[in-house]
Image (cartoon, helix red, strand yellow):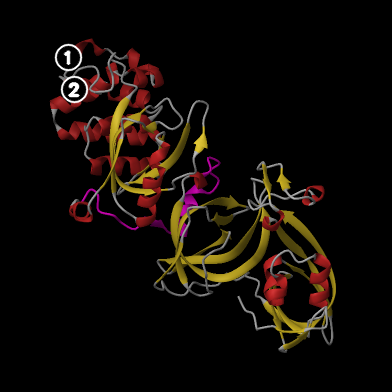
Amino acid sequence: MAQTFMRENKCLLIEALSLDPSLILQYVQEHKLVTDREYDQIYGLLKLSQTKEGVVIDLIDLLRRKGDEKITARFLDLLQNTPNIIDHMPKLRTLGWAGVPPEVPQCTSPESKTGNCKTRKMDFFGYIHNVSEIRRGKNKQYFTAVVMEENNRWTFIVFPIQLRGRFVNAERTRTPVKLENLMFRPDYKFNRIFNERSTFSILKNSLFENNSDLKPKDTSLNLASLEVYKGNKENWGINKVNIIVQVIQKLQEGHCKTKAQKCIPMKKYLVGDIVANVTTHADLVVWCPKYTTETGKWYRVTNVSGGWYNDQLILNTTQQSAIVNVPSGGECNVPPDMIQRHDFNGKIIGHWLSEIHTCPQGHPLERESLSGKRVTCKMCPMAYIPSTVKTIITGKLSIQSEVDLREFSVGDSVIRKVLGRQGEGSMPVNKVEDALVGLPPVTVTVLNDNVLSITALTEGVATHNSSSMVVRQLRF
C-alpha cells in the first residue's frame, strides 16, 4: 500500500520535498532508510549543484527500487509525523495521508519524550579538524570542531571545554575518534551539539583500518574543482579545504592588516596543480609563515580558505593550516602573462621609511601609549611590558645604478634580513635608514616594484657607527 501511495503521489511529493532536500536526506540517513553509500551518492549530486527537484526524484526512485514495503512506509510516516519536516514543507499537509497505515512510532529518537522529533542523537566516526579557540556565548563557553568521515564533514559545537585538549591532540596526531550521543537540533545554527552526555573515545588504528566505512583517504581537492564555487556568495571559505600544489613563484612578502585589525606577516605565492595535463593556478597567501617553502617544490597545504576575486582564485592559510613537502606532481605550466622577477644592481642612496608599533597580538598601538612601564593595547585590551612591543618598518628605497635611478617598495622582513643582527629587536627607524645607506652596492630581486631580497655585493660593510660587520648573501 505504501509503494502504491508513493507512486500515485510522486509529483506532489517532489514538489513538497524540493523546498529543502538536504533536510530530508539527513532524516533519511538518520533513520537508516538508505545506506551510507547511497546517501553519499545522492548528497554528492546536491553538492554538485544538481537541481533540488532532481535530487528528490533520485531519492524517491531509490526508495521505490528497493521494493521494501516497510522502508517505504517508514519514509512516508517520517514525512507525515515529523513536525520539523512538516513545518519546513507545508505542502505535505495537502496529501491524503489517511490511506497510509503507520508502520513505526511517530518518533524513534531516544531523546524525545514528547513526540517532538526535533531533537535526536547522532554518532560519528572519523578524524578531528579545525578545533577552534574557546569562545564565550551568552550563557557558557564553548568551542567548535569538524569531524571528517570518509565522504562527509560535519561541524559541531562542544560545551565541555575541559575536553578541548583531547580534541586538539586528536587533530595533531591524526588519530581516529568516535563521538557518541551528540544532539541534533536542526533549528540551531550549530545543529550538532556535543554536551555533557556525549562521549569522546579514541579508535585503535587496526579497528579503523579494517572498517571500510572508516578507512581514511586523501581529502585534498584540486584547484580546478574549486571552479564550481566561482560567483558563490555563500563564502565556501568557511569550510576549509586541503590542497596539493607546486610553488611557482613568490609574489610578495611583508606585513598586511587583516579583518581583525591585526598587522601580521605574510608571504604570497603563485601556485598551481596539474589535472589531465592541464595546469590550474591560484594565489596562496601564507599568514604568519613558519614553514619553509621553495620554488618548484610541491606541498600539501591543509585547512586553507579563500574565494574568487576578479576572476582570480585566492587562498589563505588559517591558524590550523600545515604545509608539508610531498613528492613532485610534475612541472606546472607558467601563465603566459606572469611577470618575471628581475635583479637590479646599484647603491642605496635614498629612503622613505615609516614604523608601526604593534602589541604581541599584532594590533597597531597609538604612539602616546608607548611611554611608561606598561604599553596599553585598547583592542586586546591588555597592558604589556615594553620589551614585547614589535616594530614593523616599511617604505621605499631609492637605488642608483650605473645608468638608472629606481624606487622600490620594501618590507620589514627584507630589511631585517639584510641588516643581520643590527636589524634584530626594536631598532629605531632613523638607525635603520643610516644602516641601509651605509651598505655597499647591492643586488635587489624585484617583482612588481616590490623588493623580494637584497644581496650585498661585498662582505665588508660599513655601519652607521663606523664599526664593521659581515653581511651574508641572502636569498629567500
Q: Are marks 1 and 2 in contact (CB under 8 Å)?
A: yes
- Identify the residue shown where x is 64% and y is 46%: 259
- Above or below, 365 against 349 in this view is above
Q: Main secondary structure of the magenta part?
A: loop
Residue 4: x percent and y percent? Answer: 18, 22
Residue 108 visible: yes
Residue 101, label in figure: 1
Residue 409 vs residue 335: left or right?
right
Residue 95: which quarter of the image?
top left
The residue tagged 2 is 73
Residue 8 visible: no
Residue 310: x percent and y percent? Answer: 63, 53
- Above or below, 436 against 362 in this view is below
Amino acid type at mark 2:
Ala
CA distance separating discs 1 and 2: 8 Å
- Identify the residue shown where x is 25% and y is 13%: 97
The verdict on residue 301 being magenta is: no
Q: Earlier in the sequence, mark 1 or mark 2?
A: 2
- Identify the residue shown where x is 45% and y is 67%: 299
| Circle 2: element type | helix
Residue 473: x percent and y percent? Answer: 65, 83
Q: Give the range drawn in magenta.
A: 212-235
| Circle 1: element type | loop
- Identify the residue shown where x is 64% and y is 53%: 360
Q: Of 37 and 241, which appears nearest the observer?
A: 241
Amino acid type at mark 1:
Pro
Q: Of 239 and 181, which appears nearest the observer?
A: 181
Identity of the residue furthest to the front in this view: 373
The verdict on residue 214 being magenta is: yes
- Above or below, 454 against 283 in this view is below
In the rendered image, which quarter contains the N terminus?
top left
Residue 89: x percent and y percent? Answer: 38, 21
